[in-house]
Amino acid sequence: MIKARVLPTGIGSLPCVDANQALDLVFKYCPQVPFWPQLPKRDPREGMVAQFSENLPCIRMSRNGVFFDPQRKENELEVFYAHIIENDTDHFKITPDFARGLHSFYERLEKSDYPDIEFIKCHVTGPFTFAAGIQDEAGKALLHDTVFMQAITKGLGMKALWQIKTFRKFGKKIILFFDEPYLGCFGSGFTPITRETVVSVLEEFTAAIRSEDVYIGVHCCGNTDWSIFTDVPGIDIINFDAFSYQDKFVLYADDLKGFLQRGGIICWGVVPTQEFDGSQTPELLVERIEEGFKRLIAHGVKRELLTEGLMLSPACGLGTLDAAKAKGIFKLLSQTSEFIKKHF
């Protein structure tokens, strides 16, 4: 188990245009688990689908966003899989044009020691959210194309491995989150995929990037069937919106009990994002977490399993907000972490 000890971290996106301004927030408020920030307001290429699209077969970027271009499909798939077979992670690197925050984060880590760092957090968009965001020539999401769904899963896994390889030099354990907001609607008519498919794809994805010094987390900010994540052996951390969906989350107490018993931990996204208005306090947020604890404990979950690996985060990414609101959210996150350490 990760002995997280109430460590705060972020989800990914920030509203800053300047990478160094974003990193100032990250290192000030998440010093033990800093992360590289996505900066979608800086450039459309930093959107959560576009950012990881480089060198994936038949996927292009234009002024109007990411699109599918099947003209050289067979050739591009052949070249793509050649790099996969060779385990050529450098071919799948994320360049500065698509992730200025990632490269500035790396440069800052090179220049300073940052002794408080316990984990370096990286992230990639999950295969379902990525594939759902791109349509084929017939107007159907690539999610329903088995050939390209497989390629996307492998390609995103390689981008995760490239990040792990890149940041491993700093000698810290790495947390790799994959973000799956699309699965927040799983089980509804908006996500016409089977449970078996979701679990199978995520098992393949996580198995490809597992190693001893890497912990894999999933972020889903909606209301989903949380057992699709607890049933994937490769997932170590589940991050959810504890401000808006905690009552739904704890309904999966039996599944979460097994997840925690095998060493998994929960990252409580208890600090509101869209709902943040400055009136929320650490006491209020801790009270909300305690309510969740009580519900889970009533179903046989041991309290120490909930507290030993406790992590905190905002409910979701902050990329659509303004900078002042993002700073307030991070400040509240840090204050809530300190409050729990002091009083519990």
Image: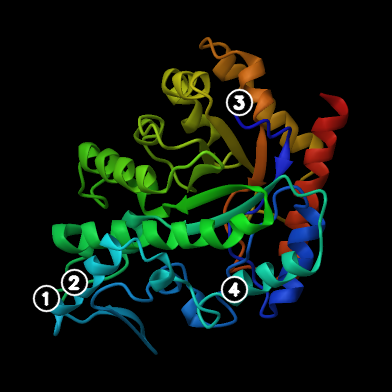
Badges 2 and 3: C-beta atoms under 8 Å apart? no
- Single out the residue that lies furthest toward the bottom: 63
Badges 2 and 1: C-beta atoms under 8 Å apart? yes
Q: What residue is disc 4 on? A: 39
User: What is the C-alpha distance between the residues marked 2 and 1?
Assistant: 5 Å
Q: What residue is disc 1 on? A: 74
Q: What residue is disc 2 on? A: 77
For marks 2 and 3, the one nearer the N-term is: 2
User: What is the C-alpha distance between the residues marked 3 and 1?
Assistant: 50 Å
Regarding mark 4 in the picture, which secondary structure is present there? loop
Is 186 above or below relative to 292? below
User: What is the C-alpha distance between the residues marked 1 and 4?
Assistant: 33 Å
For marks 2 and 4, the one nearer the N-term is: 4
Front position among marks 4 and 3: 4
Regarding mark 3 in the picture, which secondary structure is present there? helix
Mark 4 residue type: Leu
